[in-house]
Image (cartoon, grey):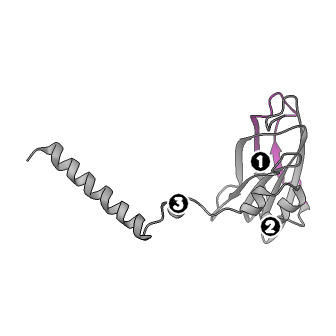
Amino acid sequence: MNQFRRAFLKGAGTVGTVAMAIATGLLKPGAVFAATWNTLAFTTKDLSEAISNAGYAGATDSSDIVIKAPDIAENGAVVPVSATCNIPGTTSMAIFVEKNPAPMIADFAFSNGAEPYISTRIKMAKTSVVRVSVKAGGKNYTNSREVKVTIGGCGG
């Protein structure tokens, strides 16, 4: 038997089986690969509401959260931000930007013993306070830093 024909028939059979599973509702591709995320927190336009909806309300200021970000960002479309949390038992960290159209930027969860360190590039509409909030030991903590933006990245 021709090897190409065999491989083609095997692939077509697999595709047909997966298509049938999707059609009958046994397999939901979006649910399989997409993590659950807090739609309300990410779409809220007000900073305090976004913090509350994300579960970081009532946070205590802590210098144990170290934020690295430039004092002046020349381009708000790519602002490098990293944060380290030195509070034991850290389970999650979130980044908020006060004057962005949608203040919640990211939310990171840490599993058993993972080092609470995050590093990413964010968009900033204009000069604003970058806030990192942390959940650790059943309590909420926060720290912030102002970043001046010369060219806005969120339509500015």
Say above or below: 136 vs 81. below
- Left or right of 21? Residue 44 is right
Estimate the x, y position of residue 64 in percent, counting from the top left: 84, 54
**Residue neighbourhood size for the residue with mark 1, other residues' Cα within 10 Å, grouped as few (<14), some (14–19), many (≥20):** many
Disc 2 secondary structure class: loop
Q: Mark 1 or 3 closer to N-term?
A: 3
* Distance of label 1 from label 3 (alpha carbons): 31 Å
Q: Residue at x 86, y 57 (%)?
A: 142
Q: Residue at x 63, y 65 (%)?
A: 112
The residue stretch that appears in magenta: 61-83
Estimate the x, y position of residue 36 in percent, counting from the top left: 63, 64
What residue would you read off at disc 3?
30
What amino acid is labelled 2 in the image?
Gly
Disc 1 secondary structure class: strand
What amino acid is labelled 3 in the image?
Gly
What amino acid is labelled 1 in the image?
Ala
Discs 1/2, front: 2
- Left or right of 118? Residue 6 is left
What residue would you read off at disc 2?
55
Can you tell which quarter of the image residue 45 is in? bottom right
What residue would you read off at disc 1?
83
Can you tell which quarter of the image residue 61 is in? bottom right
Q: Residue at x 87, y 66 (%)?
A: 57
In front of the other: 34 or 65: 34
Disc 3 secondary structure class: helix
